[in-house]
Image: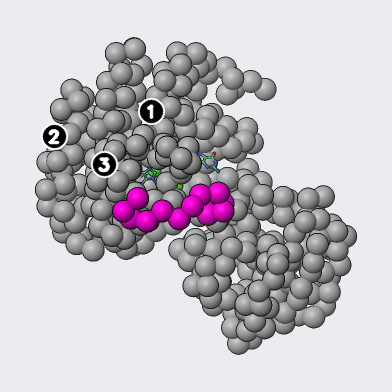
Amino acid sequence: MSASNLNFLVLDDDQLLRFMMKKMLRSFSAAKVLEASNGTEALEILRVPETKPVDIILCDLNMPGMDGMEFIRHLGEAHSTASVIIISSHDDTLIAAVRKMALAYHVNLLGTLQKPVTRTQLEALILQQKSALPRKAAYASATPNFTLEDILQGIERKEFEPFYQPKVSFKTGLINGAEALARWIHPQYSVIAPYAFIELLEKSGNIDELTFLILEKAAIACQALHDNGHIISVSVNLSSKSLNNPALAEKITQAVRNAGVDPKYIMLEITESATMTDVAQSLENLARLKMHGFGLSIDDYGTGFSNMQQMTRIAFSELKIDQSFVKGCADNKNLCVVVRSSIEMAHKLKIECTAEGVETREDWDTLKGMECDTAQGYFIAKPMSLASLLAFCATHTPDVLFAA
Ligand code: C2E
Ligand code: CA
Ligand code: CA
């Protein structure tokens, strides 16, 4: 059992439940099991610097004083790297709301367990810890902290390259697109993932520098794919902050046309976000992009803010369910509820639904059963260079996805 190197904290006002959980965790030979009867006590424990901090917190929702929701908020505000498992006797709708809230606070929720908790269920969630480390934390240890100046210099030297992750139709198993994901090919540190530079670029108002570099390269790649007979679209991430700029739509259209590509082959992925401050201006940009023929995609669906509800008035062409709902949906009832309703909503709006973060055959089968349209994830392929994508497209056959 891989709990042997993990530290746990059990937070519940019920002493008997704490006792039971501790016993169960010890039977998995957990490295350390701490306990707290209320949120304040738990936060105190987490504040004490440890050589090895708490990895997983088992947390009740309904507690006198600070409830589970408030506790999760404090975890988020403290940028805690601990993951959370919620233990509750509440129904799916509350759990789904808490999941959404945890995501908004950037707290990594491994899942939820209904009381009474069984050993097998708990074990299954703990096993997710390894693959589900918060994305930021997972990268933080491996990459140095770059300054804005470093990053801007890198962009100026055109050291940033898109890697492409294929998207595949659930029905046919054929490739129908690829998402361009920025990578910094750093002369000293090799390949750097987006978490080391996107946030700083967005915060400082410099994200467009990167967007246009990636867009130009992605458009050229799209042309190369078509030249090789692979008529697929390429998706590019667009920060919602950029939508506040009145000149954006024209600039994007120009960049894509310069590469000789019809905008209908470029999908722009936009995440729901609080940075979309000027809703009217954003809608104007989206309408203009739509008019020029671009595909528009709602990215990270389920994690964001309510502005996007206004956005559904603009004809989006794709809804991408965030990987935090997709990963492990095959054996998690609560995730299934969110995923199914997202797919239904997309289809009611007559737009395609893509699931990102499809890692296993079980999740693939579950999503296919729910009539999701497109899959993206490690089960199909990881992001790769353009040369590798061209080779992948040339050799991919659908049967590998449907094999029993
Ligand atoms: P995203 O748009 O949600 O992209 C999907 C992320 O999930 C990618 O991470 C991809 O590598 C990862 N992924 C795909 N399938 C799987 C899977 O099966 N399992 C797991 N565990 N992960 C999977 P990546 O490349 O690190 O990008 C992170 C985020 O950085 C992106 O999330 C996007 O929000 C942002 N980003 C990347 N490139 C750009 C860009 O050019 N411009 C902007 N504004 N943001 C970008
Ligand atoms: Ca995306
Ligand atoms: Ca996502």
User: Where 234 sits versus 77, above or below?
Assistant: above
- Measure the alpha-carbon separation of dots 1 and 2: 22 Å
For mark 3, give the secondary structure.
Answer: helix
**160 is higher (above) or lower (below) than 272:** above
Rendering coords of residue 259 (x, y %): 19, 25
Q: How crowded is mark 2: few (under 14 residues within 10 Å), some or many (20 or more)?
A: some
C-alpha distance separating marks 3 and 2: 20 Å
Relative placement, left or right, of 6 versus 199 is: right
The disc labelled 3 sits on which kind of residue? Glu
Q: Quadrant of the C terminus?
A: top right
Residue 252 placement, left or right of 309? left
The Cα–Cα distance between marks 1 and 3, rounded to whole angstroms, is: 28 Å
Check disc 2 and give the amino acid type. Gln
Q: Name the residue under label 2.
A: 254
Q: In this view of the protein, can residue 371 be seen by the observer?
A: no
Asked whether the beta carbons under mark 3 and mark 2 sit within 8 Å of each other, the answer is no
Query: Which residue appears at 46% of the width and 16% of the height?
Result: 391
Q: What stretch is highlighted in magenta?
A: 138-150
Image quarter for residue 158?
top left
**Which residue carries the number 1 mark?**
177
Disc assigned to residue 156: 3
Label pair 1/3, CB-CB below 8 angstroms: no
Q: Does the beta carbon of the residue at mark 1 sit less than 8 Å from ligand 2?
A: no
Q: Which amino acid does label 1 sit on?
A: Gly
Residue 225 pos. (x, y %)? 33, 19
Q: Earlier in the sequence, mark 3 or mark 2?
A: 3
**What residue lies at 22% left-to-right and 35% top-to-bottom?**
294
Task: State whether residue 261 appears in this view.
Answer: yes
Q: In which quarter of the image is ligand 1?
A: top left
The reply to whether the magenta stretch includes residue 5 is: no
